[in-house]
Amino acid sequence: MPDPTVPPTPAVPLTALLAREDLALRLIAGPSDPSLVIHAAHTSEMADPYPYLLGGELLLTAGVHIPEAAGSGTYFDDYVSRIVAAGGAALGFGLAPVHDTVPRALVAACDRYDLPLLEVPPQTPFTAVARAVWQLLAQARLAELRRVTEAQQSLASAASRPDPVPSVLRQLANRLGGWTALYGPEGTDIASAGREPAAPVPGSLAELADVVRPSGPGTPTSATHATAGTHLAAYTLGTGFVLGVATPSREPGDHTIASVAAVLLTLLTGEQQSGSGAARTSALVRLLLGGTAEEVAPLLGKGATWLVVHASPNDRRDRADLLSGARGTARPAPTHPHPPDLLAATALGASLGSPLIDPVGEVVRILLPTDREPGPQPGWTLGVSAPAPPQQLALADTQAARALTRARATRTPLIRHSTRPALDELVPRQEAEAHARALLAPLAEHPALTETLRTWLSLHGSWDRTAVALAVHRNTVRQRIARCAALLDAELDDPDVRMELWFALRQE
């Protein structure tokens, strides 16, 4: 547990006070450790200042309380020992008007009890020393607030990345200068960041995590401990997970920073449970057991419409790498981005406001109520369907997939499927589908050619963008389009031909 004699506020190094040339203070006894700090300044002429100290103070005295025969007895030993027992950080002795020099017996007592003793010159009033302490404390407090604010911003930014949980742990370890670990409901070390400390610190931190893991009424939400010169802290996330932190020291703002990380990790690892969530789970079960979309639609909300979102982690490679092969440089063939992990997909769903996610594969699919408008997500490329009732979710899924393809090809963070009335609405549906089947019949057995033609037309005949969207070489795109032109016996440079083919492809 923290030392109860130390205030939970930023402290001022004693060396910073000694460095003030306007004060001209001089350390004449006690340790000169640079790590010594003070939390306040207090003036007292009491022979026993113990009742008036809270701990961490620089006690200032002019020696008015010192009797004439003090040097021949135990007065100074008793006086200094009481200051040390009260948690006093240092003693400042003022010269004049009572004493011309600091009593030698006081110097010796401070050396014996390791209490720093400062000589305050006659020209420096105690109020000037106290004011300097408060100025330094204010500066330290401002710096600490800035540190906490910057840490909060960096943690929030880390939580929005495609790998949010590892990112938050890394950022927390960096901000606190220590080691962080996430423990699962069974106590398993799921993830960690920072330089792992030597034994027995990891084991002690795991044991501390067990203390705060929910086990019934009265379980604490956080706990601290110290072992092997390392400060340990554990925070329950309310989801069975526990955050553990190990740092060489404990600064006043560390608890606030770790608490912010605990809240973010709670959101990232938690499951959204509600009545609507139960209904949606029921709808899924009924569909798996053979129910129709019409039967389960009421469980999803009367008159409810949905958006289907397809999300892909951003490919960090430079676009030139994808197309350099066409410029004569040998490069590996482009591939799709690495599939996201479950935690990243869950965090994306939480950011968009929906627990209905399908993270399997290279693309994350999310079902989103239309009252939750999706926005661009850092680290992701999104394709969004038009609003659709449950009966038309399959069509919305196709719309989202095509929107994502276009978004990736154009390097756009988010693209929505257009809901503007189309030309095909002027033609009876059955006639339009019959015309499309007849026109595209030569491509019926070549789905890759059909998809390449659709993508190429949607991107206005751009070879480069089509190559990026399909993750193939642009020479492959050229070959496929040439093959389409041959099978269709059509001149694809003719805008009328392109328009007719696009009309037909939209009927699929």
Image (cartoon, helix red, strand yellow):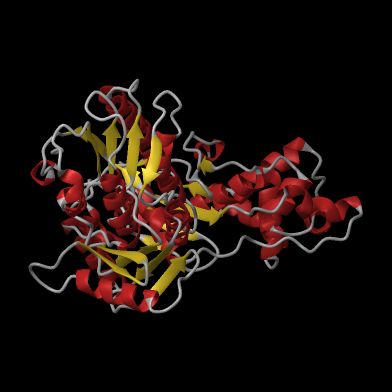
- Residue pictured at 79% horizontal, 45% vertical: 492
> Based on the displayed image, in which of its 4 quarters is residue 169 positioned?
bottom left
**Rendering coords of residue 426 (x, y %):** 51, 36
Q: Is residue 498 above or below residue 171?
A: above
Can I make out residue 408 in this image?
A: yes
Left or right: residue 446 versus residue 362 is right
- Residue pictured at 46% horizontal, 62% vertical: 166
- Quick one: 74 or 487, which is closer to the camera? 74
- Quick one: 347 or 46, which is closer to the camera? 46
Can I make out residue 453 in this image?
A: no
Task: Work out which quarter of the rendered image holds the C terminus and state it.
Answer: bottom right
- Residue pictured at 33% horizontal, 46% vertical: 116
Total marks shown come to: 0
**Rendering coords of residue 59 (x, y %):** 23, 38
Left or right: residue 265 versus residue 295 is right
Q: Is residue 377 above or below residue 93?
A: below
- Residue pictured at 74% horizontal, 59% vertical: 472
Residue at the outermost top position: 123
Residue at the outermost right position: 328
Left or right: residue 415 versus residue 245 is right
Task: Work out which quarter of the rendered image holds the N terminus and state it.
Answer: bottom left
- Quick one: 293 or 304, which is closer to the camera? 304
Q: Is residue 386 above or below residue 441?
A: above
**Rendering coords of residue 487 (x, y %):** 79, 59
**Rendering coords of residue 42 (x, y %):** 20, 34
- Quick one: 356 or 440, which is closer to the camera? 356
